[in-house]
Image (cartoon, rainbow, N blue to C red):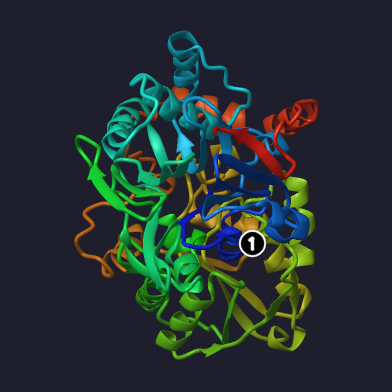
Amino acid sequence: MCGIIGIVGRNAVNQSLYDGLTVLQHRGQDAAGIATYEDGHVYLRKSDGLVRDVFHTRHMLNLKGRMGIGHVRYPTAGASSTAEAQPFYVNSPYGIALAHNGNLTNSERLKRELFHDGLRHINTDSDSEVLLNVFAHELQTYGKTRIGPDDIFRAIAQLHKRCRGGYAAIAMITGVGILGFRDPYGIRPIVFGSRETEQGTEYVIASESVAIDVLGFKLLRDIAPGEVVFIGKEGEVHTRQCAEHPRLSPCIFEHVYLARPDSIIDGISVHKARMRMGEALARKIKREWPDHDIDVVIPIPDTSRTAALELAHSLGVAYREGFIKNRYIPRTFIMPGQALRKRSVRQKLNAIDLEFEGKNVLLVDDSIVRGTTSMQIIQMARECGARRVYFASAAPPVCYPNVYGIDMPTGEELIAHGRSVEEVARLLGADRLIYQELGDLVEAARKGNPTIEAFDLSCFNGEYVTGDVSEGYLNHVEAQRSDEARAKRAAASNALQDLYTSSGVIADVG
């Protein structure tokens, strides 16, 4: 899970890219980076940390140019090292920078092919570097000194044939322009928009519509599965479908947790989808537990608030804010390392005792993944004097790894994997556990856009839309992405020198 943004403007884009990344910070808090272009030079700054920590005044002044791309990272494939911060850059051909959200499921094979067929060395474990080099290799086969939109579209068409998995990406070709593209299943989100200025029209491509809104752009539409949107450096727009058999199957977890509620993804309001999730949960409670003794509904801030409010309203039960969130503690389920996740839960939330004391409390969360946060929150509610603690998840049980760009690496780390609802409730310490029905979740999202025929539901049902995820691949993912493997890789990556961490000219392409 990452956030990406690209802008072709009429004036300097450094501040707009910074502001856009800040709005997309929820999609990645591990590292941030910006690459810009001006007069034959590419300027790059990237490092570990939040956007506000990576970019200081001196860095912003050095990020010159009217076009550029940005990235905020949470590592799913690869290591969480500075060397793997994005955008990635290759100087041949032309000079290309790329920012990527998602995961390739055949990156190891592609890495071998790039070395043997293209004589390209991949310096990190990141599949984003692989994606960049596949694109660069396809462009290089044309042997041209200058390229146009048709060349770019043909290169992406070949990329779609070679790459598998979920990917939304933005690339900047020096002296040419910026392009955004999406995998043939549209698993990961990407949108584009425009705004009018006195100097002419400016264009933006981003992970979520909220980044477009905040920057004062008008949302034009989502980029379709398999489609490429190319914006030349002077603002000319070209689009083309470059996949042979595109089929929209977006990741439904965007609506459960990943996206901001004020975003619109594939025509669906995330806010409205979460409202419908709460209504569906209420119907289930009325159906299966008509004589419930719930006194108060309390959300786990922030992503569950919308669903919890609708649930309480539908049940006719009081809604209360029982937890106060410390805004300076990052999201815990996507923190690498179980010990860090456990430690941060108490730092992240503080309970208001009077909302719990002597009451039967229904806690509502967007989902239950590892169960670390849920377990500790239930314990906090009991320490505050709650008589009974019930727990509701706005999503069904997360039982399978999501391999398309979300850090749900191994079945063993998922609390619902191979367990009944009652067993999970006992492990969490809840008096009762209510999960959303999968059909209700799908309906909650699809109602916003009935034309969507299917969603990626792999983390709930184990059915992977790309059709290439085998048991062997899942075992490989487990070995690569488990907390233990991640710790070993992090230790090894400390010795890897990052060539492009300081702001300044990294390419002189004349």
Q: Using the rendered image of the protein, determine whether residue 454 is visible from the camera's viewpoint.
A: yes
Q: Position of residue 86 (x, y in %)?
A: 60, 42
Does residue 214 appear left or right of residue 347 in this picture? left
30 is higher (above) or lower (below) than 270: above
Q: Nearer the viewer, residue 289 or 65?
A: 65
Q: Which residue bears the numbered disc 1?
A: 374
Residue 176's image quarter?
Answer: top left
283 is higher (above) or lower (below) than 316: above
Q: Position of residue 262 (x, y in %)?
A: 46, 73
Q: Nearer the viewer, residue 131 or 296?
A: 131
Q: Residue at x 32, y 58 (%)?
A: 222
Does residue 438 appear left or right of residue 130 in this picture? left
How many marks the image carries: the answer is 1
Q: Position of residue 380 (x, y in %)?
A: 74, 70
Count neighbours of disc 1 (C-alpha within 10 A) and say few if under 14, some if 14 to 19, many if 20 or more: many
Q: Residue at x 48, y 37 (%)?
A: 103
Q: Secondary structure at mark 1?
A: helix
Q: Nearer the viewer, residue 251 or 58?
A: 58
The quarter of the rendered structure image containing the C terminus is top right
Does residue 17 appear left or right of residue 307 in this picture? right
454 is higher (above) or lower (below) than 302: above
Q: Residue at x 39, y 53 (%)?
A: 234
311 is higher (above) or lower (below) than 370: below
Q: Which three-letter amino acid code belongs to the residue tagged 1?
A: Ser
Does residue 457 appear left or right of residue 101 in this picture? left
Residue 60's image quarter?
Answer: bottom right
Q: Residue at x 56, y 56 (%)?
A: 27
Query: In the current view of this chain or complex, which residue is farthest to the top?
Result: 116
Q: Position of residue 38 (x, y in %)?
A: 56, 47
Q: Using the rendered image of the protein, determine whether residue 395 is visible from the camera's viewpoint.
A: no
Q: Nearer the viewer, residue 169 or 203?
A: 203
